[in-house]
Image (cartoon, helix red, strand yellow):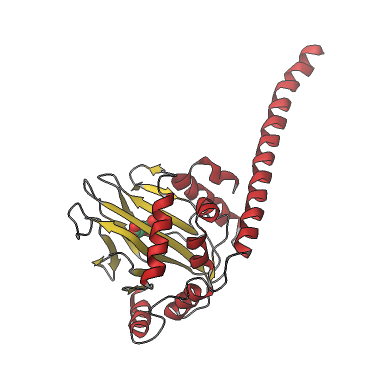
Amino acid sequence: MAVDSAAWLVPATLTVVAGSALLFARRRRQALYRELLEAQGRLPATAGTAIRHAAPPDLRAACRSFAATHLAVVPDALDQALFDDLRRAAERLVATERSYLPVHKKGGTVAYETISREAPELTALYLGRPLRDLVARITGVAVVPTPIHDQSSLSLLVYERPGDHINWHFDHNFYRGRHFTLLIPLVNRGSDAGDLSHARLIARIEGQERIVATPPNTMVLFEGARVLHKVTPIRDGERRIVLSMTYTTDPTCAWWQGVLRRFKDIGFFGLRALWT
Ligand SMILES: O=C(O)CCC(=O)C(=O)O
Ligand SMILES: [Fe+2]
């Protein structure tokens, strides 16, 4: 009898300990998100007003391009002073985090929660009405930022060691709505002054590979689930930092989409994504 109860005791204790640890991790995450959302509520609503190209004719060209190819490019998108602020904020953060997903991706990623905590300039631009309205005008549909628990909603992609790159991929959509990726390169430097790095964003459009130039302050907007794309490796002495933002027409998701998103986030941001 005593042996029987002891045999039950071990798995039961392990289950309780594992369950409590998961619950604890989840509670802590929820408290963190509450805190970040409160901080976001205090950000200035007008952030990002200095978006240069919020008027035709550039915008008309971007709308046409997006309608035809699901991709649009807006050069010199932000006012120089705003751009410089964002670049400085990104440089400040870059030492923080680095994650690797072998084969598919090699490079560093700074996640949404780190940016939210430490770079209000970047968060304010992402959440601000002006940028969201610009995305809506180019895509032709109303959009909202993707949720705080999605680590890719707002991230910095850091290419700084020789070979840093991303292989061919789609930006998978884990939402009921359509899903758009907006990139703004903040740094793109070759080893010689004035040169761009060798990293090329390449998109497959209607069966053809198209090189999308990404000098600093270019806005690249695309529907990542429809446009296959990759980034070629940087070389020695080069550096490229891209601000990546995602928007959706409907941020709700089916349970299985939530599970898939967590597994994708683990690849980019580590195990903590399991309990986001
Ligand atoms: O760095 C870029 O230009 C694109 C990055 C990208 O495609 C991604 O992170 O999914
Ligand atoms: Fe991508």
Specify whether 83 is left or right of 192.
Answer: right
- Determine the residue positioned at 65% across, 59% down: 38
Q: Relative to 49, is 236 above or below?
A: above
Q: Which residue in the rendered view is the most extreme toward the right?
A: 1
Q: Residue furthest front?
A: 81
Q: How far from the left and from the top, in percent, is residue 201?
A: 28, 61
Query: Is 181 on the left-hand or right-hand side of 61?
Result: right
The answer to whether residue 226 is visible is no
Quadrant the N terminus occupies: top right
Residue 77 falls in image quadrant: bottom left
* Residue 255 or residue 198, whichever sits in front: 198
Is any atom of residue 94 visible in this view? yes
Residue positioned 42% across, 76% down in the render? 51
Residue 128 on image: x %, y %: 53, 70
Residue 85 found in image quarter: bottom left
Task: Please tell me which residue lies in front, 15 or 146.
Answer: 146
Q: Is residue 149 above or below residue 176?
A: above
Residue 213's spot in the image, x, y percent? 26, 66
Kindly give the residue lying farthest to the top in the view shown: 2
Q: Residue at x 40, y 45 (%)?
A: 95
Examine the rendered structure and indicate whether residue 160 appears above or below residue 125. Answer: above
The picture places residue 200, in percent across and down from the top left corner, at 25, 59
Residue toward you, 152 or 66: 152
Count the marks: how many? 0
Q: Furthest-left residue in view? A: 192
Ligand 1 in which quarter:
bottom left
Residue at left offset 60%, top offset 45%: 275
